[in-house]
Image (cartoon, rainbow, N blue to C red):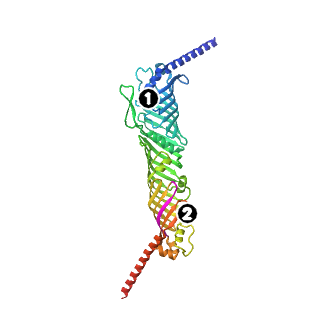
Amino acid sequence: MRRKVLFVVVAALAVVTAAVYVFANRVFGSDLVRSALEQQLTERFGQPVHVGSVRGSLFPRVAANLHDVSIGETAAVQLGDVRVVTGLRGLFSRTIADAEIIVSRSRLTLPLPFALAGTTTPGAAAPSGSGFTVTSIRVIRLRDIDLLAGKQALRINLDASVDGDRLDVTRLTMNGKSTKVDAHGALASIASLRGTFDAKADPLDLDEAMAIASAFTAPSGLTPKRRPGAGGTAESATAPIPMHIVANVAAPAGQFGAYPFRALSSRVDLTPARVSLSPVSVQTFDGTFQGRLDVDTSRAAPRLRLNGRINRLNVAELMKANGSPGGITGKPSGTVALTAEGVDASAVTRSAHGTLEAAIADGVIQHLDMVRTIVLAFGKPSGAPPEGSGSAFTRLAGTFTLANEALTSDNLSFASRDFDMHGRGTLRIDNTAVDAHADVALSEELTAQAGTDLRRYAQEDGRVIVPASVGGTLANPRISVDVAAAMQRAVGNELQRRAKSILGGLFKRKGGS
């Protein structure tokens, strides 16, 4: 008897389940429901929405499953699967309140031509007579959503709850080819995309992050709006989509192209057509940078402005990362004010221009044998010329202009134990080619050791000073001394010396008489 009762109960449950399943598919799978959803979503986004199919499901909960949903004229948003959990009450009433939305296997191509928050307020009812209504959303979950910006992509996963116009994000991960970000926070307003997040990126690839951030804040162009009383849409130039997202970002390690960095921390502001990192602090090449970075994303190629101070970078490691190892060592410090265009390190390096006021301390230009070259240029001096002296320096400084991948300075100064230099020069960043012209002043010690000819031709104020040029590259500099100019200067020095001697003699004779 008990077996028969159990069998009847199981059979009844199976019949009820089958009936609910059939009913659910009749409710959710009809063209009326699909058309109603397309109409609701089109009204919300102000963009044409196409829903490939809608099916009902019972397990693990009653839900409507949308497949192959596209939003926008160019299908900028393609949603593979959208699961709208309804519950039995929503199934029978055909009105879904406090829905749970689960979106998976989807892609969004930035910049979007519309606001994801929609053009109507959250929870707005569907048009009357649609036969199916989504009145409010309680939970949003995103699974494996690809965010695309040019060649860069991030895969998004998110868990969030909705309370009116507020979105609380308990978990947000963004993973690219190199970047891995974990974040949490809240949008105080979904409609205006206004909120604050805390994020840790380990590692952080700035090529990926800047491409996504620039595309996310870039203007979306014309915003389609519904014509009152008409079924179509009309394009009109409108104000940018509202947005103000603040992210406090910490990155223990990362890179920007070939340039590695550590311990990056910054407050990142994302607003329409602008990304700002201020302040930003980062360790790179054994030194530090502190300042700010502003990105104008209203342009086809974003424009970057970098301002701040560098402190004791390792110039040898910097040159190595730039593809030009060897040639110079030392610790540069100073201020930078640069502008560039692009979202990857290569484009930024090519287009960068601005000014740097910097000094490199305690370094070596490894093959700059200036003293030997000067001594040999004036024949056979007394004593053997020093071998390899003068390449070490205590300070190399100047105000540099950066343009067309070249650093140029009109006030170069070089201080070392054996000689000083003052002049002008250019250094190519791409191949480290050097073109410099300077007056070289030997130290008083070396001047005293120089040959008689050298002292006679080039001595001035107790030091040998000769004009010299440096060509070649940093790793293999070529030095040339302008002997003719030095001799011309020596003639002037000799005339001055004789004039002083003659005048001195005249004064002595007058005094004696």
Q: Nearer the viewer, residue 213 or 73?
A: 73
Name of the residue lying farthest toward the top: 1
**Do we see residue 461 in this rendering?**
no
Q: Residue at x 41, y 81 (%)?
A: 501
Where is residue 443? Give x, y as percent.
50, 70
Rendered-image quadrant of the N terminus: top right
**Three-letter amino acid code of the residue under disc 2:** His
Where is residue 162? Give x, y as percent.
46, 31
Where is residue 141? Give x, y as percent.
51, 31
Horizontal side of 260 relative to 130 (left or right) equals: right
- Against 280, residue 475 (above or below) is below
Whichever of callouts 1 and 2 sits on the residue coming sooner in the sequence is 1
Q: Nearer the viewer, residue 250 or 504?
A: 504
Horizontal side of 396 relative to 384 (left or right) equals: left
Q: Is residue 330 magenta?
A: no
Q: Tally the numbered discs.
A: 2
Q: Which residues are magenta?
A: 430-442
- Helix, strand or loop for the magenta stretch, by majority: strand
Q: Residue at x 52, y 72 (%)?
A: 378
Q: Distance from label 1 to label 2 (Cα)? A: 67 Å
Q: Is residue 435 magenta?
A: yes
Q: Which mark is residue 476?
A: none
Q: Disc 2 designates what residue? A: 367
**Element at label 1:** loop
**Three-letter amino acid code of the residue under disc 1:** Pro
**Element at label 2:** loop
Q: Disc 1 designates what residue? A: 48
Name of the residue lying farthest toward the front: 484
Q: Residues within 10 Å of mark 2 (few under 14, many from 20)?
A: some
